[in-house]
Structure formats: structure tokens, C-alpha cells
């Protein structure tokens, strides 16, 4: 094979109580990455202001890590078509990393399993997050709802029943992992653990109402919500309009609301827009569903 193109979906991570553990692939946006064999080195072609230095680009880092790990000689040219918005908590860097890992696997016929692909894609997260995090990349690689365990890495995938509603403020908010408390009360840890377990049960049983009721985070969301103007109003209005659950998407500033299939998504979107408007912000809504993982196109 001389070349291959792979498309990977956007994603949301944490989903309330599942900090650094839960991820969900979304069909809202996609990145497409094309890899072609060359005589040597790694070159990157892209538009949209993302770095083309292979050591600062998520796809470039993934390619370099995989070349070294699997003893690949020669080189690759990487072309990236960005579809996932950058910096909005929708897994933009993860989508490129996931597409690059799956494309590299196909180009060199490695036959890697899902956990290995996720591990390789996770290396690319260093370019944007400064450290490896697997929740977004696992969702983009495998699709569906994922549960990530580390030490060693092991990812469980579940087909989701729910339809999320994404609300993205147009103003980029700087959200740092430093806002997450280093110490928590035992009671808060127990409550988040119980909600996380209930969410998994909801996905396994195909019960959106259980998933929505369990999206309650008493640790990370309270520490980060001040970085999203109007968050409490947005959340309250969305719940009042029929959303089953509302929380921050990843590190934000996107806000995700989960709806049952019978819910009025337009009414929820209007309610969320009204909540942001009360804080003097416009916003952009995307009604979307769960997505499959990275696939050749």
C-alpha cells in the first residue's frame, strides 16, 4: 500500500464523574489524515494554523513513535484536513492522533489491536495537553462509549444509546488541569464513584435516563465551571427544557447535554443559547449522535 486516508470523529471526555476515564465519540465533526510512504523522514502538510513541525504536531508525534516502536524504515508524508474545532473540549488533537495511528497501522499492515492503537495515539496528546491522556483518543479510535484503565492500559468499549447535544461558545476559554483539586473529601470521591458506576450500567443496559441522572460530578465540574461564563444558567435551563443530564465536555468550554430520543433537541438548544446569552455570550449548537471509531475512507 502506497497511501491511505483515515477519518476519525470528535469526542467528549469525562462525562461528569468519569474524569480521565470516560470518553464518547461524537459524529459532530471529523478529522481526515492521509499517510503516504516516502524515502525518509516525516513531513506534514496542513491548513488551519496547526503546527507542521512533526515534533509539535499530534499526528507527527504518533508517526514517529510508531516508526520507532515497530522498526519502520523509510518515511511518511502526512496530510491533515482539520474538521474538529481546536481548543473547544471536543477532542481535536485526539481526532488527528487517532486517525494517524489507524492510518499508520493500515499503511504498514501492522495488524495492531485496539489497546495498542489507543496507546500509540495517546502519545500524540503530548503536543496539546503536555501529557498522555487516553479518554479522547480511545473514543476516537474505537468509537462509542469507552472506559479507560491504565497500568497497564486497557480500554472497554460499549455501544451507547444516548444522543448528546453540544453547545460551543465561540470564545476560547483557557482551561487548565491545574484547576482540578489535588485533594478531595472521601464523601465526594464515593459519590463520584457511585455515579460513574451508574453511568456504565446505563450504557450497558441502554437506558439514557440512568446515564443522564448519573452525570453528576462533585469534584472537577465545580472547580472548572467558573471558567465558562453562564454555566450554571446553561445547565439549569437545559435540564428544565428536557435534558437528562448536563456537564462540561472534556476540559471545556463546550457544554454537553444528553437527551432521550423522544426529547425536543431544538428546545434544549434554545435553552442553552439563552443561558449563554444571559452571560453576554453567543454560542453555536450542534445536534449530534454517538459515532463509530477511526476508519479508512
Image: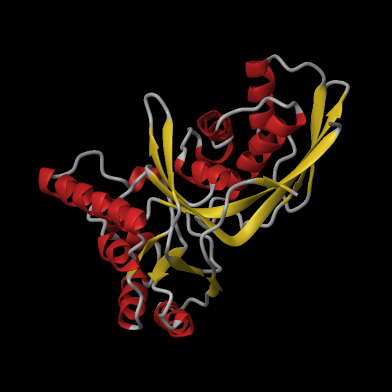
State the image coordinates of residue 173 (x, y, percent, origin top left). Answer: 48, 59
The image quarter in which residue 155 lies: top left
The image quarter in which residue 153 lies: top left
Residue drawn at (64%, 34%) of the image: 101
State the image coordinates of residue 69 (x, y, percent, origin top left). Answer: 63, 17
* Vertical placement of residue 7 versus 257, above or below: above
Q: Residue furthest front?
A: 205
Residue drawn at (35%, 53%) of the image: 204
Q: Which residue lies furthest to the left in this view?
A: 187
Q: How many marks?
A: 0
Q: Is residue 41 visible?
A: no
* Vertical placement of residue 54 versus 212, above or below: above
| Quarter of the figure with the N terminus | top right
State the image coordinates of residue 50 (x, y, percent, origin top left). Answer: 70, 46
State the image coordinates of residue 290 (x, y, percent, origin top left). Answer: 51, 60
Residue drawn at (67%, 46%) of the image: 295
**Along the line of sight, the residue nearer the viewer: 20 or 170:** 20
Residue drawn at (78%, 16%) of the image: 73
Q: Can residue 244 be seen in this view?
A: yes
* Vertical placement of residue 153 versus 24, above or below: above
Q: Which colour scheme is used?
A: secondary structure
The image quarter in which residue 209 lies: bottom left
Amino acid at each position: 500500500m502506497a497511501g491511505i486516508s483515515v477519518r476519525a470523529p470528535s469526542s467528549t471526555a469525562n462525562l461528569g464523574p468519569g474524569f480521565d476515564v470516560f470518553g464518547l465519540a461524537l459524529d459532530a465533526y471529523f478529522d481526515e489524515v492521509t499517510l503516504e510512504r516516502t524515502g525518509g523522514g516525516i513531513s506534514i502538510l496542513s491548513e488551519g494554523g496547526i503546527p507542521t513541525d512533526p515534533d509539535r504536531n499530534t499526528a507527527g508525534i504518533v508517526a514517529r513513535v510508531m516508526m520507532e516502536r515497530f522498526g519502520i524504515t523509510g518515511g511518511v508524508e502526512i496530510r491533515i484536513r482539520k474538521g474538529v474545532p481546536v481548543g473547544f473540549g471536543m477532542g481535536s488533537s485526539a481526532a488527528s492522533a487517532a486517525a494517524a495511528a489507524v492510518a499508520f497501522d493500515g499503511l504498514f499492515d501492522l495488524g495492531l489491536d485496539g489497546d495498542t492503537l489507543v496507546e500509540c495515539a495517546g502519545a500524540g496528546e503530548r503536543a496539546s495537553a503536555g501529557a498522555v491522556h487516553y479518554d479522547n483518543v480511545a473514543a476516537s479510535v474505537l468509537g462509542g462509549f469507552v472506559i479507560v484503565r491504565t497500568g497497564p492500559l486497557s480500554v472497554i468499549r460499549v455501544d451507547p444509546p444516548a444522543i448528546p447535544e453540544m453547545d460551543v461558545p465561540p470564545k476560547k476559554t483557557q482551561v487548565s488541569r491545574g484547576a482540578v483539586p489535588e485533594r478531595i473529601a472521601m464523601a465526594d470521591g464515593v459519590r463520584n464513584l457511585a455515579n460513574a458506576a451508574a453511568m456504565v450500567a446505563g450504557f450497558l443496559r441502554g437506558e439514557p435516563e440512568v446515564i443522564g441522572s448519573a452525570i453528576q460530578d462533585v469534584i472537577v465540574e465545580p472547580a472548572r465551571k467558573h471558567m465558562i461564563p453562564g454555566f450554571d444558567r446553561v445547565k439549569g435551563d437545559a435540564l428544565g427544557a428536557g435534558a437528562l443530564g448536563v456537564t462540561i465536555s472534556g476540559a471545556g468550554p463546550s457544554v454537553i447535554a444528553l437527551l432521550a430520543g423522544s426529547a425536543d433537541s431544538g428546545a434544549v438548544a434554545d435553552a442553552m443559547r439563552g443561558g449563554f446569552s444571559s452571560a453576554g455570550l453567543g454560542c453555536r449548537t450542534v445536534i449530534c449522535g454517538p459515532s463509530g471509531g477511526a476508519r479508512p475512507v
